[in-house]
């Protein structure tokens, strides 16, 4: 770590807790819910059709939840609704709709199959009535009797509604098979199947709700009626929880001493309004950095409101670290902006300094 990193202009700032402004509109919530439900229905139908051939236990719900959440995220971004609780509830509703649709499509397919079975039974009865050959009639009677006495057929014939289908389907049980196909599958049974369906619905609902809540809680400029844009300032080897506590307290001067204290990575980003560059306050966000199969992923840990100058001071601090790429960001356009700020075009406002 370069010594210059410890002398960068960081001090004590007037940090304020970040609070979502809670912007709400009935039209926005209605559109967000409608988009979520529409995507949920489409994904439910697709999952049911694909499920006729194969079904990946617990994997399909992840994809369905992500798709529904993405649809609602798009709607929230455009309607500018910023009430996390209401958006989360809309996500829960859409998630339940997705799973219900999937089961209902299975029910429709089941009814179609039963209609074909009824047609075959009726054809068999007509063949018995039309035949004059005693041996053929006897054979047809035996086939009909076997068909009507089959316990599975009798149970299926008693299904007359969607709810009774769910009960019948649960009695058949969900079977979990080995991925290698070298052993018999595990049937969850009647109660176990209902529990599995509940967990499946919960996964879809929670994913879609979490994505909707996260989008609705993003920093927003009320004056300009626009979402603030994120720009990563840099990263350091320090635990995200500890960095988050420092950022929320305003004690940015402690960051140099924390750098290099952990194998984990933390990044600090700034949210700024694109329409009012002279706005006094910005939002700083601390993210935990992880890598999934080589893909860099950020998980928000803490946010706080700062004077705009704090972002410029943090920029100079990160640029001063010799062993850290400019702003920890590979985006050349962002890097050039960071270099411009680091050249002194922006200054920070300190309340007190520990230098």
Image (cartoon, rainbow, N blue to C red):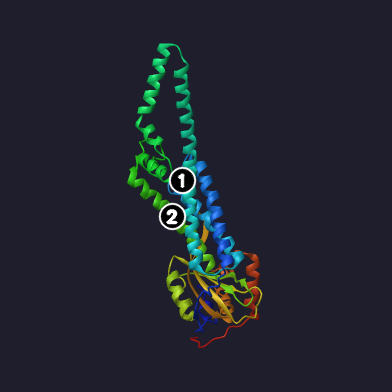
Residue 13 vertical placement versus 284 (above, below): below
Residue 291 vertical placement versus 306 (above, below): above
Residue occupying the far bottom of the picture: 352
Determine which residue is flagged by label 2. 203
Do labels 1 and 2 touch, CB within 8 Å? no
Q: Is residue 60 left or right of residue 190?
A: right
Percent from the top left, x then y, of residue 270?
56, 73
Of mark 1 and mark 2, the one earlier in the sequence is 1
Among the 4 quarters of the image, the one containing residue 257: bottom left
Label 2 element class: helix
Q: How many marks?
A: 2
Label 1 element class: helix
Marker disc for residue 315: none
Q: Is residue 231 visible?
A: yes
Residue 230 vertical placement versus 290 (above, below): below
Q: Nearer the viewer, residue 303 or 10?
A: 303
Determine which residue is flagged by label 1. 103
Q: Nearer the viewer, residue 2 or 181?
A: 181
Q: Is residue 54 left or right of residue 138?
A: right
Which mark's residue is nearer the viewer, 1 or 2? 1
Residue at image point 41% right, 39% down = 159
Residue at image point 58% right, 69% down = 230
Residue occupying the far front of the picture: 129
Q: Is residue 329 visible?
A: no
Neighbours of disc 1 within 10 Å: few (<14), some (14-19), many (20+): many
Neighbours of disc 2 within 10 Å: few (<14), some (14-19), many (20+): many
Inter-mark Cα distance, 1 to 2: 16 Å
Percent from the top left, x then y, of residue 139?
40, 16
Percent from the top left, x then y, of residue 16?
50, 81
Percent from the top left, x then y, of residue 193?
37, 46
């Amino acid at each position: 770590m370069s010594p210059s990193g410890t002398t960068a202009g960081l001090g004590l700032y007037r940090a304020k807790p970040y609070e979502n402004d809670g912007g709400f509109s009935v039209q926005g919530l209605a559109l967000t819910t409608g988009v979520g439900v529409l995507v949920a229905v489409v994904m439910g139908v697709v999952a049911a059709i694909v499920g006729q051939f194969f079904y990946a236990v617990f994997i399909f719900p992840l994809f369905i939840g992500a798709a529904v959440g993405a649809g609602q995220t798009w709607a929230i971004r455009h309607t500018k609704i910023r009430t996390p609780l209401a958006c989360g509830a809309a996500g829960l509703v859409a998630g339940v709709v997705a799973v219900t649709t999937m089961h209902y499509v299975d029910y429709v397919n089941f009814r179609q199959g039963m209609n074909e079975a009824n047609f075959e039974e009726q054809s068999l009865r007509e063949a018995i009535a039309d035949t004059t050959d005693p041996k053929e009639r006897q054979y047809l009677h035996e086939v009909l009797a076997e068909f009507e006495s089959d316990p599975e057929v009798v149970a299926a014939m008693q299904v007359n509604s969607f709810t009774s289908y769910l009960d019948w389907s649960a009695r058949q049980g969900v079977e979990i098979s080995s991925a290698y196909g070298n052993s018999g599958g595990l049937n969850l049974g009647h109660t176990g199947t209902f529990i599995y369906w509940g967990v499946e619905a919960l996964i879809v609902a929670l994913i879609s709700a979490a994505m909707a809540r996260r989008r609705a809680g993003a920093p927003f400029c009320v004056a300009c009626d626009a979402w603030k844009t994120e720009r990563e300032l840099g990263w350091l080897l320090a635990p995200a929880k500890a960095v988050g506590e420092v950022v929320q307290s305003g004690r940015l001067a402690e960051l140099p001493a924390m750098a290099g204290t952990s194998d984990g990575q933390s990044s600090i980003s700034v949210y700024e309004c694109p329409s009012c560059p002279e706005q006094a306050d910005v939002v700083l966000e601390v993210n935990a950095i992880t890598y999934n199969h080589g893909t860099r992923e950020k998980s928000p840990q803490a946010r706080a409101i700062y004077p705009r100058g704090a972002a410029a001071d943090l920029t100079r601090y990160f640029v001063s670290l010799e062993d850290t790429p400019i702003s920890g960001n590979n985006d050349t356009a962002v890097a050039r902006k960071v270099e411009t700020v680091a050249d002194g075009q922006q200054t920070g406002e300190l309340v007190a300094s520990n230098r």
